[in-house]
Amino acid sequence: MKIAIISTFPPRKCGIATFAKNLIEAIDLHQSEEDNCFIVAINNQENNYEYDENVRFTIQQNVLADYIKAAHHINYSGAKVCLLQHEYGIFGGESGVFLLTLVNRLKIPLVVTLHTILDKPSFMQLSIMQSLCKKAEAVVAMSQKGINFLEDAFQVSNNIHQIEHGVPDIITDSKATVKNTFNLADRKILLTFGLLSRNKGLETVIEALPKVIEKHPEVLYIILGKTHPGVVKFEGESYRNKLKLLVKKLRVENNVHFFNEYLNEKQLFKYLAAADIYITPYLSKEQITSGTLAYALGAGACIVSTPYWHAEELLSEGRGIIFPIQDHNKLSALITDLLENEDKASKMRESALAYSGHLKWPKIGRKYLDLMEIAAARKVKKEQSTSIVDLSILPRFSLTHLKLLTDDTGMIQHAKFNIPDFKTGYCTDDNARALLAMTMAYHQRKQQEVLGLITRYLSFMYYMQREDGNFRNLLSYDRKFLDETGTEDSFGRAIWSLGYLVKYAPNAWIQTLAQSMFDKAEPHFKHLKTIRGLANTIIGLSYYLHKHSYDEKRMTLLISLKEGMLALYRKSCGENWCWFEDKVTYDNGVLPLALFHYYEVINDEEVLEIAIASTNWLDGLVFRNDYLSLVGNQGWYSKGGELPMFDQQAIDAMAMTFLYYRAFRNTKNEKYLKRMFKTFLWFLGDNALSVPVYDHKSAGCYDGLEKKGINENQGAESTLAYFLSYFRILKAQHFETEPNLLKEEEIVSTERPAANI
């Protein structure tokens, strides 16, 4: 049976790649050459590997179009089953959400092997896992605890099968023979192997050595393995160097050896055979599968480990010994005891070796093949329904123009064509939008350059915040303040971005600064009068309260801001006019959007009714045809007046994209999902002029639709409006595939009446 396997693959150095290579060989042992498996390989963004003939197709991790092409390739490859090796971090998008684009297009049965199963998943991790398990004919977990987590944390219970991690079927020479080969006959060997990273806890073993050496100076601790490529990329060899400094500090240089190599399995098993004690001192319990531990068990090693999930299960019934995390004193005592009690160590080795008999790869391969034959025998699932949100037409993500508009101060306001216009300087408005857009981008892509941009824009806003907490808005190119206090619009946009950062900051430093700036600005909330200042601030405060849901003072403040918006709505609303002002102007979708955000924090049905009513009324204005036609800024739209078609601004399309997304989440009405995608198509040419507003060549966005055509300038506001809409669409696509999973992690409904707050 021909099987397509989606996975990383050697020469990429990662545990899942090694697993996939072993698995494909193990399955093919039981099949004819005509039915051999093939690999669809996941590449790092920066690397293209020289694969062997097993790899028939490659996916660049962060290129969405590749996932769609891969689905087409698999569907017409002749494969009867697709076997997916799943780990959140190897796929593109937030928590690997791009993978769903591929999975939802498969026309053959899917089997999923889960390499990471969390007990406390984020919303996106939860919903991705539920989507995968729903699509799959069978789900493979490698431990009973993993199955328990699937059932308890993910509410998945159907078609789960336990197939443990395989181990190589390699026979080595005796311990004495191997030690002689390595010139280690007179040494007692402690061993840890695998890719180095800070969560491995190797310092615990090094700190345990001095007490062990007092009685056993012949001990040698071998740290075998290269540093993880992802660690090297971001911090070089700092962890390895830290360990070397610790070795020197403790004066155990003669008892520790760093073997900075990536060994093949035969070489690795020789070292395992030579080891007197194998140690996995990991610092976290949250590891559901450990290939290195399975290998050590398969080699019949005497194993000592911290109590991470896989170790607790695999080393039960005398197959190993557990010690507390970071307890080097306990570890010293255990090592000394095992070195002085060979009978005890031998029994552990025998128990480990006996258990590992059923884990040899040929047997594991047979189990997988049997499972996939069952999956293939079932009827192929019903044909895929037409997708409302078709991600295949989204332009390829590029930061080219956005980076061109950004210098070491922040984002330049305007451009002449696609060339930054330095004379226009900077503003808080645009840098706040940029901060919001790049935070959303980071959660989708985890790129280091995006993190750098987040820091740049936050730094600009920090510079623009006055001592009294308010914000200036305008800064000249030579860094001179051009106003003392910005508009309420710019203040509100700053608060929106800071509130979002309080909830979703990519690291603790950024979160702490955003929190501090938010706190400093808070005294100005109660003085806001303008509708957009109120609306943007409500959105920011709502995000803040998702993070700090029991901040009673700010909950009360949120209610007062809402009352300010409702007062303006009641004043303007009348027959055939369900709006907050007597004129419909700019950034309109933000107004009902703020009420949806409020409703997600405090379940006030009146607020929800007004949010829906004003959304539907605005929808009737901008969707008079089967495409978005925004309210033009040539006079705007007043009660009793004519609705102008031009000039249409990208910021209004962005606001409508965000509005339809929230409306869909809160009402589950598919109409809003369709509207949201149609709104995004405005950028791609589905508009009154049938011309693209997004420029594929520059990766910038034109400044709007004018009666004469496109405004060819590509300034910050329009470009950021496109990017904000782009990332909102990516997140909304997931809700289409699983419409019952609309309650995001961020929603905290207090259901408390205002009087009790």
Image: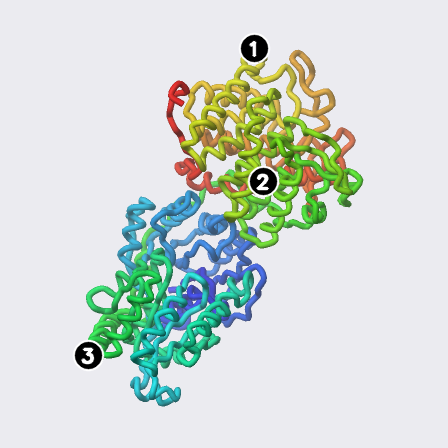
Q: Residues within 10 Å of mark 1 (few under 14, many from 20)?
A: few
Residue at image position (45%, 77%) is 259
Q: Give the residue type that dot 1 points to.
A: Gly
Which residue does the numbered mark 2 point to in the structure image? 436
* Cβ atoms under marks 3 and 2 closer than 8 Å: no
Q: Secondary structure at mark 1?
A: loop
Counting residues from the start of the chain, the first of labels 1 and 3 encountered is 3
Q: Nearer the viewer, residue 137 or 573?
A: 573
Counting residues from the start of the chain, the first of labels 1 and 2 encountered is 2
Which residue does the numbered mark 1 point to in the structure image? 574
For the N terminus, the image quarter is: bottom left
Cα separation, mark 1 vs mark 2, equals: 35 Å
Residue at image position (34%, 84%) is 187
Q: Nearer the viewer, residue 212 or 113?
A: 212
Q: Give the residue type that dot 2 points to.
A: Leu
Q: Is residue 715 left or right of residue 559?
A: right
Please state which of the two labelled residues, at mark 3 or mark 2, is closer to the viewer: 3
Q: Is residue 263 left or right of residue 416?
A: left
Residue at image position (57%, 37%) is 517
Q: Is residue 219 above or below residue 735?
A: below
Which residue does the numbered mark 3 point to in the structure image? 343
Cα separation, mark 3 vs mark 2, equals: 62 Å
